[in-house]
Image (cartoon, grey):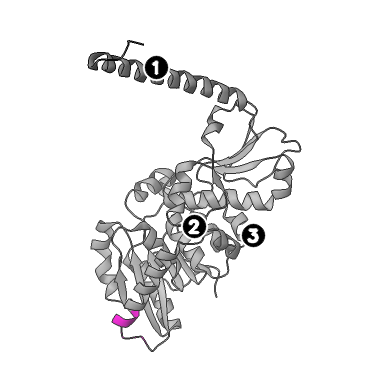
Amino acid sequence: MEICRNRTQQRLCAKIVIVTIITVATIWLIFGLRQSRDRVTTCEPTMTVRKMGQFGNQIWEYMSIYVIWLMKYDTLKAYNITPYIEEDMKNNLEDLFENLTIQSLPRIFHFCEEKDTIIVPKNKPFRLPEDISGQNILLDSYSARYEDVVNFGVNNIKKELRFRQNYIDDVMKKLEELRTEANLQNNETVFVGMHYRGGDYIPHLEGHHGDKFKGPPNYSYYIKAMDYFKEKYGNVIFILISIDNNWLADNALKITKHGLVVVNPYTNDRNRDLTLLSHCNHSIISYGTFGVTAALFAEGETILYDLELPIDYRGDTIALGLSKLLPTWMRMKNTRETNFQGHSL
């Protein structure tokens, strides 16, 4: 062939080849997607959770779907139902926890034909209809099924939500540094993690609960809670974590004068903060899923701020709910009164 012999013809031929390849690839991709959609119109049924909220909420959403899946395993498998979570949620959680069991929802499932969906409200017991053939199950947003989690067992949950080793190593090193700085290397030291959730959460509580919300805890709540641990244990190091700088400016100085207190040993490091609080011996928390998660994982005595609100199964009040189930969780109000509300030790 005489074509494509000189340089000009070669450039033209190259352009023709490139255009041809792009055209063929585009046609193949479109055809493949159409076929993919056709092939997955009968997807297997799924159980998922509607992701909503911040990191602590997502941990509880994962725990909720995980415990239901295992507690109802035989029934769900009989109907060929598989649990999934959203891909971004899995990536977010696996940045801190290793090798989660529940996989991310395959992208191809977004092409599935719609199925009837059983929506599980966050404030209702988990009950399935007699026949769930071919139906999806969706746990409501902000699901924090603490009753199911406690029934399943905190130790079993911790076997699933395992902190990555690099975070554990870093936190153990930090605790040893704090012990050394306090000259307590040769003494038995008790670490008490303290967490305050402020910032945008206060307007949320005010908006959701109105006049029933009596305001956030201040230094007096934490000081009284610290007194409990100081009287019960000898050498106590308190670790206070909060990202609310305004609250810290108003309260941290009074708190630090009342004991051996370290404030925010890490700077804006969510993963290390949660790992550190979870590896303390005991906990003092306010409200919200982040502090509650840390206290649950620590498995020690927990003093929690008494919101004096009805339990609505959201992150606001699950600490109050847990105090009704766990004998080492005690409610305390924001005053100087000496009586605990809830379980006593």
Q: Mark 3 or 2, which is nearer the eye? A: 2
Any magenta on residue 191? no
Left or right: 112 as drawn, with respect to 252: right
Which numbered disc covers residue 20? Answer: 1
Of callouts 3 and 2, the N-terminal one: 2
Of callouts 2 and 1, the N-terminal one: 1
Query: For numbered disc 2, what is the local secondary structure?
Result: loop
Magenta segment = 179-185
Most foreground residue, 172 or 274: 172
- The residue that disc 2 covers is 98
Q: Amino acid at mark 3?
A: Asn
Residue at x-position 28% and y-position 59%? 247
- The residue that disc 3 covers is 151
Query: For numbered disc 1, what is the local secondary structure?
Result: helix
Could you tell me how far apart the alpha carbons at marks 1 and 3 are, in whole angstroms?
Answer: 62 Å
Count of all numbered marks drawn on residues in the image: 3
Whether label 3 touches label 2, CB < 8 Å: no
Task: List x then y, in percent, for residue 304.
Answer: 45, 64
Task: List x then y, in percent, for residue 126.
Answer: 65, 46
- In the rendered view, would you say 90 is above or below 16? below
Location of residue 40 (image quadrant): top right
Most foreground residue, 312 or 12: 12
Which numbered disc covers residue 249? Answer: none
Q: Amino acid at mark 1?
A: Thr
Q: Residue 259: in sight, yes or no?
A: no
Q: Residue 81: in sight, yes or no?
A: yes
Any magenta on residue 183? yes
Q: Amino acid at mark 2?
A: Glu
